[in-house]
Amino acid sequence: MKIAYLIHSERDYDEVIETLNQLVKQNDHAFIMINDNDLRDKVAFVFADHPRVHISHTQEFAQEGDLSLARGTIIQMKEALEYDQFDYFINLTDGMMPLKSRKEIVEFLEKQPGKDYYYVASKETPELKKKAERYYMFTNLLAFPTSKFIRGLTRGNAVLFSKLGLKRKVDDAYQIGSPWFMLSNETVKKLVVHFEYVSNTFKMAWYPEEMYIPMMMEKFIYTDRADDHINNDYRLIGPDGSWQASNGAKPITAELIASHPEALFGAKITTEDNLDVYQDYFDIYNTMISEAEEEKEKTFIDPALILDSLRKAKENRQD
């Protein structure tokens, strides 16, 4: 099985490098959006010759709650298919990592081959329709995910515009759920044909990453067959373990992980927020890697050595 990981990261250099190294050791590929320009350049230089690490350049920046995250992810799917064929596409948002070995994740997916995994919490309720039809002007501000003032201002303006008759015109039934998914190759091939749907439908929307996958699935996939996706979220999300609408992942604890043995991935796990958990899980994906694969991976140059050489070359030029 070959997996394409679709990643969005705001982590520092060491965490990004380590995450990429771990995910691609066993022939999986990583497609990553990195928000920081300087960091993106460094990571691109380090992995310039690596055949399974791909830095997103069509859209380089994304943010929680804004159209950019949904649009950037669907673009990653499209570019992944142009590069190769994959059995599954799994998205990892900032600070998310595997909680199981690759062998365990693959065995889980092979139990129901070709099934799609994503979680829908509700569909076309009056409350959801009212919220989704509004236009939210400030979701692209950098402070939007964390500032109560900006979020309140965004909601207030949306209510005002709605009263003035400025509403989204969408015929499709609104659905909302967890923004994390595991989608099969056949499904993604059909979705990317309609990648423009994301931008056309969710301009100035509130947390479009929580709506676009279930809505696209119903519109473009379940046209000639019944909806047979697995409606479970196998991601453990802090602080309480499960997805909460309009909220990004918060740090998780070792105790929370232990109480959810079914979870395949978890967030947030970072050196800044929960170092002990990070140290326990950063390399768990490769705990069952074969000696042959481990040896093959050593043929790639150590990123630390590359950066050290780059640093020395810069110092020599200055001298």
Image (cartoon, rainbow, N blue to C red):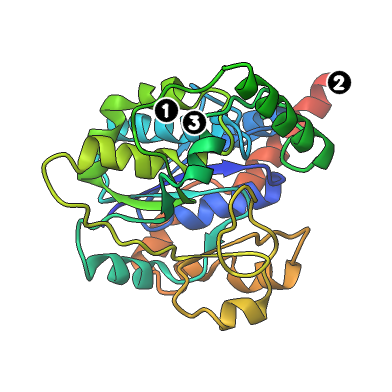
Vertical position of residue 230 compared to residue 306: above or below: below
The 10 Å Cα crowd at callout 1, few under 14, some 14 to 19, many 20 or more, is many
Label 3 – label 1 distance at C-alpha: 10 Å
Kindly indicate the quadrant of the structure image that contains residue 199.
top left
The kind of residue on which mark 2 rests is Gln
From the viewer's perspective, tell me whether residue 168 is left or right of residue 318.
left
Q: Residue at x 51, y 57 (%)?
A: 22
Q: At which x and y percent is residue 245?
A: 58, 52
Residue 55 seen in the figure: no
Considering the numbered disc 2 on the image, is that residue within a helix, a strand or a loop? helix
Q: At which x and y percent is residue 246?
A: 62, 47
The kind of residue on which mark 3 rests is Gly
Query: What residue is shown with label 2?
Result: 318
Query: What residue is shown with label 3?
Result: 72
- In depth, the one of 62 and 179 nearer the eye is 179
Query: What residue is shown with label 1?
Result: 198
Which of discs 2 and 3 lies nearer the camera? The answer is 3
Most extreme residue toward the left is 224
- In depth, the one of 79 and 305 nearer the eye is 79
Vertical position of residue 70 compared to residue 298: above or below: above
- In depth, the one of 80 and 251 nearer the eye is 251
Instruction: Tell me how many marks there are.
Output: 3
Residue 242 seen in the figure: yes
From the viewer's perspective, tell me whether residue 158 is left or right of residue 57.
right
Q: Residue at x 56, y 83 (%)?
A: 259
Which of discs 1 and 2 lies nearer the camera? The answer is 1
Q: At which x and y percent is residue 51?
A: 39, 39
The kind of residue on which mark 1 rests is Val
Q: At which x and y percent is residue 196?
A: 37, 21
Q: Residue at x 65, y 51 (%)?
A: 247
Most extreme residue toward the right is 319
The C terminus lies in quadrant: top right
